[in-house]
Image (tube, helix red, strand yellow):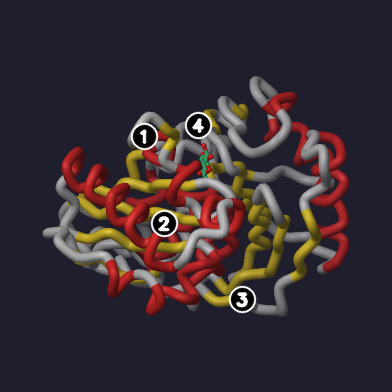
Amino acid sequence: MQALGIDIGGTGMKAAPVDLEAGKFAAERVKIATPHPAEPNAMAEVVTKLVDAFSWKGPIGITFPGVVTNGVIRSAANLDKAWIGLDARSLLAKAAGQEVRVLNDADAAGVAEMTFGAGKGEPGTVVMVTLGTGIGTALFVNGTLVPNTEFGHLEIRGKDAEARASEHAKDTHDMSWKHWAKNVGEYLEHIEALMSPQLIIVGGGISKQSEKFLPLITGLQARVVPAGMLNDAGIVGAAMAAHPGSAAPAVAGAGANANPALASAGTGNGPAPSGFPNPGLPE
Ligand code: BGC
């Protein structure tokens, strides 16, 4: 079973068909730069191009780098503010030529990691942190997602955390690995103080170079590990949201077809397409 996953980011918009049983791309990913200004109509045109690139006809899930409730965008820290309050599900469905599901990008990446990656089978409290243009977070309690957490905007030393510890902050301020790792470490200490996760999964494009900064982060109780799927998790999680009941359970024993991680993903996009079990998405 396949679905098209589209991952909308502040820098690039990426898509690939995903094999939902394997949690792997079924064809090579296509990436198009995010238009600037990052306005809804211009970005919707890119969604059309990505769907056309695969002549895609099946289910589609789309991530967005902001709060998404019932398909409506509630925040857009790194995109044009015209997105806020917009019904992205309708706009992007029109662009894709069919129904789509829309969810927060870090939530999607977290769901993929909990099902196929570094968080597979992990009970208790797990936090996924994506370090990219901004900082995204996904919080899991016994494999179930608490959707739309925004811990990338914690205030640290008087600044938005993502202004100090995102990959974008590292590049903009030309920080050394050592300097940036100190900021990321301080950020993760805040996460630990607030939520006491047993596992912190670090994702985003820069997780490919985790050996350059994770060993410099010490003194946390939580295990801190790089994302198992590196930067592919967003696309895989987007595709999973298109078929919320189709993937393996995030936590062993959670039920044959149920994916508890997605049961509360907040996509609010109505029932799953017929033929696929719906693990409890709001209808
Ligand atoms: C947004 C989050 C998003 C993260 C990563 C933040 O600025 O507020 O919703 O998950 O960036 O894209």
- Give the number of the disc on residue 50: none
Q: Which residue is mark 1?
A: 154
What amino acid is labelled 1 in the image? Leu
What amino acid is labelled 3 in the image? Phe
- Depth check, front residue: 203 or 266: 203
Q: Which residue is mark 4?
A: 283
What amino acid is labelled 4 in the image? Glu
Report, in whole angstroms, how far the alpha carbon at label 3 lies from the one at label 2.
16 Å
- Tell me which numbered mark, 2 or 4, is placed earlier along the sequence: 2
Q: Which residue is mark 3?
A: 25
- Image-quadrant location for residue 121: bottom left
- Give the number of the disc on residue 111: 2
At a point 41% along the width and 56% down the height, the residue shown is 110
Q: Pointer 1: residues within 10 angstroms few (<14), some, or many (20+)?
A: some
200 over 187 or under it: above or below: below
Query: Percent from the top left, x then y, of residue 221?
Result: 12, 59
- Tell me which numbered mark, 3 or 2, is placed earlier along the sequence: 3
